[in-house]
Image (cartoon, grey):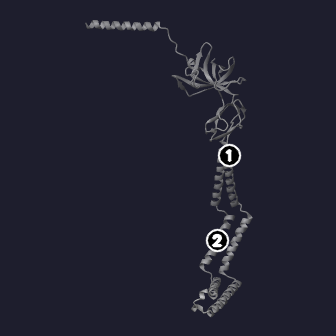
């Protein structure tokens, strides 16, 4: 019974195998789509639009036209668009102003920074080369302070006579006021505070005390007076030394102030420059984004500039086909946008960084289009046939 069952199972397996073979050979083969049939969208590196034609010894691929030198230009600062000097299709030269922002506030900052730099530079120049008038004034201050100190230490005979005369006059006036005060009753008179003799005596007494103090100072000045006079001499001398022989630290500080002011000016000027879009090379404006008066954000493309005299086609060639390509091989190029026109070129570069799209590994290939008068614009779909032999 078991042997019968085993024979039945084996028979069924044989029948199933024969049926599968028949189906496989009887069904028409379905050709897998070529990379070229799937190309036409995405970046050139993603369009692995290539296939080899053994009969014609060529490789055909689909790519995108691009300028060899193209730039998306943006402001480096925010602001409001003030001028737009170009439109799409204009040819411009390197250094031309394309678009600018309103930089009124930034211009004021430049003027302020310029004034700060001039002030710092003037201080440095004054340290290095003081004016003769400033030096003369400082020397006069030193001489005056020294004379004051010398006068305190050694008063002249004339000064002594004057001080003694003033003291004697004050003493005489005090004696007269005292006599008048006594005649009016002196301190025993209860109304003395209201009489002029009391006020006159007080004034004469104050004058005498001042004269006495001046006379004493002339004869023997106090330590406080001598120290004050000496401090005046030292201060005047230090000011003269700073003018005629500034310290290394003072010069370094002044030079640092100049450098800081220069950096502030450079930054202010750069901020103004950041509010302008300048053409970095000769080329054609292929796109202009902003409108007059609208706000612009930093690092957002506003203008696209391309060198249309040097155009390329960028391809993505599958890894099996790229082995047939070499730099310098010639190519024939056609575009749907320019029917009936054919262009020529050569492979200028075969990339080394592979990418994978839809399971197909490809390498970037660049075709330099030979100079032509044809209006080839960036971003056009192009079919390229590369001669491999």
Mark 1 / mark 2, whichever is N-terminal: 1
The label on residue 8 is: none
Q: Position of residue 176 (x, y in %)?
A: 66, 91
Residue, disc 2: 234
Label 2, residues with CA under 10 Å away: few <14, some 14-19, many ≥20 = some
Image quadrant where residue 170 sits? bottom right
Q: State how many labels appear.
A: 2
Which dot, 1 or 2, sits closer to the camera? 1
Residue 326 visible in the picture: no
Classify 298 as above or below 135. Answer: above
Q: Position of residue 53 (x, y in %)?
A: 60, 15
Q: Secondary structure at mark 1?
A: helix
Query: Closest to the observer: 98 or 144?
Result: 98
Query: Closest to the observer: 187 or 227?
Result: 187
Q: Are marks 1 and 2 in contact (CB under 8 Å)?
A: no
Classify 206 as above or below 235. Answer: below
In which quadrant of the rendered image does the C terminus lie? top right
Q: Residue at x 69, y 28 (%)?
A: 308
Q: Position of residue 70 (x, y in %)?
A: 65, 31
Query: Between marks 1 and 2, how big is the CA–CA gap?
Result: 51 Å
Classify 312 as above or below 188. Answer: above
Judged from this view, the residue extending furthest toward the left is 1
Image quadrant where residue 132 sits? bottom right
The label on residue 104 is: 1
Q: Secondary structure at mark 2?
A: helix
Label 1, residues with CA under 10 Å away: few <14, some 14-19, many ≥20 = few
Query: Closest to the observer: 265 or 211?
Result: 211
In which quadrant of the rendered image does the N terminus lie? top left
Q: Position of residue 215 (x, y in %)?
A: 65, 84
């Amino acid at each position: 019974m078991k042997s019968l069952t085993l024979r039945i199972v084996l028979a069924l397996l044989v029948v199933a195998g024969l049926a599968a073979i028949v189906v496989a050979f009887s069904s028409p083969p379905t050709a897998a789509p070529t990379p070229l049939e799937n190309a036409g969208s995405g970046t050139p590196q993603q369009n692995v639009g290539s296939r080899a034609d053994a009969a014609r010894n060529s490789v055909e691929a689909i790519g995108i036209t691009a300028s060899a030198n193209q730039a998306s230009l943006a402001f480096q600062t925010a602001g409001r668009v003030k001028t737009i000097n170009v439109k799409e299709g204009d040819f411009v030269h390197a250094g031309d102003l394309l678009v600018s922002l309103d930089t009124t506030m930034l211009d004021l900052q430049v003027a302020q920074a310029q004034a700060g730099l001039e002030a710092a530079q003037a201080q440095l120049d004054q340290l290095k080369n003081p004016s003769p008038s400033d030096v003369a004034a400082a020397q006069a201050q030193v001489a005056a302070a020294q004379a004051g100190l010398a006068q305190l230490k050694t008063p002249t005979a004339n000064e002594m006579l004057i001080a003694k005369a003033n003291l004697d006059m004050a003493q005489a006036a005090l004696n007269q006021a005292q006599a008048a005060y006594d005649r009016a009753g002196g301190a025993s008179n209860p109304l003395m505070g209201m009489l002029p003799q009391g006020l006159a005596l007080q004034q004469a007494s104050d004058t005498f005390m001042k004269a006495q103090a001046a006379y004493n100072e002339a004869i023997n000045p106090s330590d406080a007076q001598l120290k004050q006079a000496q401090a005046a001499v030292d201060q005047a001398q230090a000011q003269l030394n700073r003018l005629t022989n500034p310290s290394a630290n003072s010069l370094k500080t002044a030079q640092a102030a100049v450098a800081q002011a220069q950096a502030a000016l450079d930054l202010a000027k750069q901020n103004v420059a950041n509010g302008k879009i300048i053409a970095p090379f000769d080329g054609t404006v292929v796109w202009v984004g902003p409108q007059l008066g609208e706000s612009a954000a930093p690092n957002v493309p506003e203008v696209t500039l391309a060198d249309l005299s040097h155009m390329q086609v960028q391809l993505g060639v599958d890894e099996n086909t790229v082995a047939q390509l070499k730099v310098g091989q010639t190519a024939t190029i056609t575009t749907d946008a320019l029917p009936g026109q054919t262009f020529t070129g050569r492979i200028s570069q075969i990339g080394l960084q592979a990418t994978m799209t839809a399971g197909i590994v490809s390498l970037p290939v660049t075709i330099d289009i030979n100079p032509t008068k044809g209006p080839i614009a960036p971003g056009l779909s192009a079919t390229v046939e590369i001669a491999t032999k």
